[in-house]
Image (cartoon, rainbow, N blue to C red):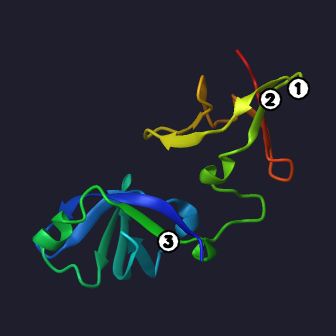
Amino acid sequence: MQRIQVSHVLKPRGLRGEIKCSLFPQAAGEPKTVYIDDKAFNVLKYLEHGNFSFLTIEGVGSIEDAERLRGKSIKIDRSSLNLADDEILTSDLIGYQVFDESGGKLGIVKGVENFGSSDVIDCGDFSFPYEDQFVIETDTKKRTLVVRVF
């Protein structure tokens, strides 16, 4: 099964091992199992509050246990996502070719970052937010993006 990163551990919350995470994407729903360092953890409790997710996971019962997970990536099985037919993951955009409105090739997507307000597409020499005002078309069959150049 393919696993994808959906979050990362920010810090412990409370004394009983609950962990504070970056907000899980909506498509992840309420996960039953998460993977941290390729180790499976059953999710006992999942809560979203504001821009954060909070997890209570089996085997992590103290603040010390949770502290050992700080900064680590949280992954889930891709097959557990609830994606609509017209939805893709921004991580799927890596390798897409990027064109301007007139069809000129601008580059290839090398990575996707999120700094809080939106996903940012990194093409090496340039980057742009993955938002409607910049991205005109995402073609999943051709694996291309058409962007508006300002």
Badge 2 amino acid: Phe
Pointer 3 residue:
76
- Closest to the observer, 32 or 140: 140
Pointer 1 residue:
103
Horizontal and vertical percent for residue 112? Answer: 56, 42
In terms of image quadrants, where is residue 120? top right
Badge 3 amino acid: Ile
Crowd tier of the residue under label 2, counting other residues whose Cα lies within 10 Å: few below 14, some 14–19, many 20 or above: many
Q: What's the CA distance linking mark 3 and mark 1? A: 37 Å
Badge 1 amino acid: Gly
The residue drawn where x is 64% and y is 36% is 131
Q: Earlier in the sequence, mark 2 or mark 3?
A: 3
Q: What's the CA distance linking mark 2 and mark 1? A: 5 Å
Horizontal and vertical percent for residue 110? Answer: 61, 39
Where's the C terminus, which quadrant?
A: top right
Q: Find residue 99 and name its label.
A: 2
Q: Find residue 132 and name its label.
A: none
The residue drawn where x is 57% and y is 41% is 111
- Closest to the observer, 15 or 97: 97
Label 2: element kind: strand
